[in-house]
Structure formats: structure tokens, C-alpha cells
Image (cartoon, rainbow, N blue to C red):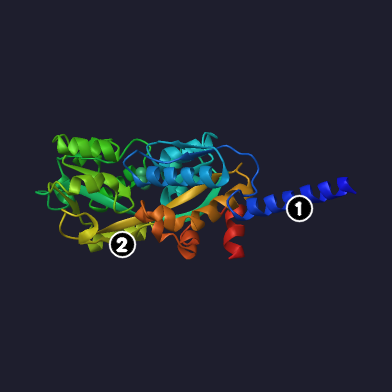
């Protein structure tokens, strides 16, 4: 009899523990190691990746490694080579990779990955010295077009192309956002491209010093760009986005998206998406871009298949 009571007690305790585990953080996911491919240390990918990693470790007890990289193009390669499970990728770059087109035409199509959620707009910001009037004025100047392996570089090429310009019109440098800011301050470059969520930490630092402005992509040029590359949409950077910068700028934007390698388990992805939404307001306290996360935008404008785990999360809601 006594033995029975002990067994029943133990069983009840186990059930209570299991319920607590399910509802208060410890999610029901198989043991897994997650590596998140982000970007340079002064970008938004890196800050967002660290916030997700911190939350996953704290709430689910999952070990997470945050990988710094050149950006979207390198992140696709990290997924492809099985060196990352999760990656931040621009939606344009993700589509070229999936279909093996544009910059990925030599590597061929890569189908073994899928979308987890669309996150926030990434604005193509062209930061230039105050005396530079517009994109055509970049002729003959030293310009950073983004890091090696970035999505920024492809946006730079396409935007220059819309103005009838190529690399032969400028003096090209490949720098991360952080290195661009340093080179700008030291007078080694006159402008740099930066495709990232607004406000981008690297640009905020520079704006306060009063030497920089953001160039606009003219209406007609933006429209011709969008007709050729439908991933772009027009976007205004409001004057208050960067204190010290002054006037607003009108440019184009793509979309930051979280992607998963083909081997990542559906339950794990489901829990990651759930966590992303459950922790949105907490993460947004330090990372404004996270605050814009919503269910419609998360599945909108994603031109490749969604991961089944993410699909289940969105379907249930
Ligand atoms: N979208 C950028 C790229 O792939 C990186 C943005 C970031 O680091 O926040 O080039």
C-alpha cells in the first residue's frame, strides 16, 4: 500500500513537472545544436541573432552559437555547407540561391533550405559625405559597396545599374558596416552602401557627428529598379531615424528573413518561431526592428517554401 502511494506521488510530481516544462519555458524539443549565421558586428543581423540565441538558451536550454559573417550571400553558403542551421538572409538573395540565378548561377540551385519567418524591412541606405548631392555624384569617388559575401553588394550593383553606372565609375572598396564607418571618419572613403534595418547601429554612431547624409534613390529610378527586380519596394527613411542627420531620404528596401537548413527538425523550428513571437516585446526593448514582427508580414513576400515547422505555427494561428 505504502509503495503504491509513493509511486502515485512520484507519478503526480512527474506530471506536474512535465506540465510546467511545457508551459513555462522548457519546450518539447529534441537535443540539438544550433548555429545562427548573422552578419558583421555593427549590423542588425548580429544584434538580432544574439538576442535570439540568448532567449533560446535561457528559455529552452538549447546551446546556440552566433556566427559573424559578411552577410546574406555568405550565410546561404554556410547553410549549404552544413556549417549553420539558421541564417539571416535578404529575401532577394534567398530567392536567387533557391533558383540558382543571378549571383548564384555558377553555384546552381540550392533547394535544401526553407524560410522560417520574414522579419523586418532592410533599407538600402547610401551614406555619403554632405557635399555629395546624389547617386550620380558618386562617380570617381571611393565607395564601399558592402562586405565580401554581403547582400548589400548586390543591391549596390543594382542601384548603380539603375543610374547607368557600374564598378568602373567608382573606386570600389569592400568593407563591413563597422569598417565603413571607420574608413569614412578617417577620410578613406566618401560613401558606403548599407542594406540593413533602420536604425542601423553603425549609421547611428556616424549620424550624430554631422558629416554624413543618406542619398535618395529618385522616384523614376526606384520604379525602374522595382520593375526589373520585384523584391524591392520604395521606402522613406524619416528625418528622425538618425538624430543629427537632418532631412528624410527616399530609397528602396528588401526584407530580412530567417531561413533554416534542410536538416533542422520541424519541432525545433516550430519552437523557434513561437519563441520569436512570444519574446518579441522583450527583444524589441533593445532592438527596435524586432518590434515590427507580425504574423502577416512573417509569411508575406517570401518567395521560397516555408519550413514545415514554421508553417504549422502560422497555420495553428
Ligand atoms: N542585409 C545585409 C547583407 O546581407 C546585412 C545586414 C545586417 O548585418 O544587419 O548584406
Name the element at disc 1: helix
The location of residue 32, given as percent across then percent down, is 61, 39
Q: Secondary structure at mark 2?
A: strand
Disc 2 target residue: 234
Q: Position of residue 258 (x, y in %)?
A: 48, 49
Find residue 304 and report its horizontal and vertical position in percent: 52, 53
Q: Nearer the viewer, residue 189 or 21?
A: 21
Disc 1 residue lies near ligand 1 with CB under 8 A: no
Residue 12: assigned label: 1
Q: Is residue 204 visible?
A: yes
Percent of width and height locating residue 287: 36, 52
Instruction: Please identify the residue farthest to the front as the structure is shown.
Output: 2
Q: Is residue 140 left or right of residue 193?
A: left
Disc with the residue nearer the chain's start (1 vs 2) = 1
Q: Residues within 10 Å of mark 1 (few under 14, many from 20)?
A: few
Q: Residue furthest right?
A: 1
Seen from the viewer's position, the closer of residues 108 and 26 is: 26
Identified at 40% across, 60% down, the residue is 292
Amino acid at each position: 500500500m505504502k509503495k503504491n502511494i509513493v509511486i502515485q506521488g512520484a507519478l503526480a510530481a512527474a506530471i506536474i513537472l512535465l506540465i510546467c516544462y511545457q508551459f513555462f519555458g522548457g519546450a518539447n524539443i529534441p537535443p540539438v545544436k544550433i548555429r545562427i549565421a548573422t552578419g558583421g558586428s555593427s549590423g542588425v543581423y548580429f544584434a538580432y541573432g544574439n538576442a535570439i540565441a540568448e532567449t533560446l538558451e535561457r528559455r529552452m536550454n538549447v546551446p546556440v552559437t552566433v556566427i559573424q559573417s559578411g552577410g546574406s550571400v555568405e550565410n546561404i553558403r554556410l547553410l549549404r555547407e552544413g556549417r549553420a542551421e539558421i541564417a539571416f538572409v535578404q529575401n532577394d538573395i534567398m530567392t536567387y540561391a533557391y533558383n540558382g540565378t543571378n549571383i548564384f548561377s555558377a553555384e546552381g540551385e540550392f533547394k535544401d533550405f526553407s524560410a522560417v519567418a520574414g522579419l523586418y524591412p532592410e533599407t538600402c541606405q547610401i551614406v555619403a559625405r554632405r557635399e555629395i548631392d546624389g547617386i550620380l555624384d558618386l562617380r570617381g569617388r571611393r565607395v564601399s559597396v558592402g562586405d565580401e559575401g554581403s547582400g548589400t553588394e548586390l543591391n549596390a550593383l543594382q542601384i548603380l545599374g539603375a543610374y547607368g553606372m557600374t564598378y568602373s565609375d567608382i573606386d570600389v572598396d569592400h568593407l563591413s558596416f563597422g569598417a565603413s564607418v571607420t574608413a569614412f571618419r578617417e577620410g578613406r572613403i566618401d560613401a558606403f552602401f548599407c542594406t540593413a534595418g533602420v536604425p542601423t547601429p553603425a549609421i547611428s554612431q556616424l549620424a550624430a557627428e554631422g558629416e554624413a547624409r543618406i542619398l535618395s534613390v529618385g522616384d523614376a529610378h526606384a520604379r525602374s529598379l522595382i520593375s526589373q527586380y520585384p523584391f524591392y519596394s520604395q521606402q522613406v527613411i524619416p528625418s528622425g531615424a538618425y538624430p543629427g542627420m537632418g532631412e528624410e531620404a527616399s530609397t528602396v528596401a528588401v526584407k530580412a528573413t530567417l531561413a533554416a537548413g534542410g536538416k533542422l527538425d520541424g519541432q525545433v523550428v516550430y519552437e523557434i518561431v513561437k519563441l520569436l513571437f512570444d519574446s518579441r516585446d522583450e527583444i524589441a526593448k533593445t532592438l527596435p526592428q524586432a518590434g515590427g514582427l507580425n504574423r502577416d508580414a512573417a509569411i508575406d513576400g517570401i518567395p521560397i517554401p516555408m519550413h514545415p515547422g514554421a508553417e504549422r505555427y502560422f497555420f495553428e494561428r
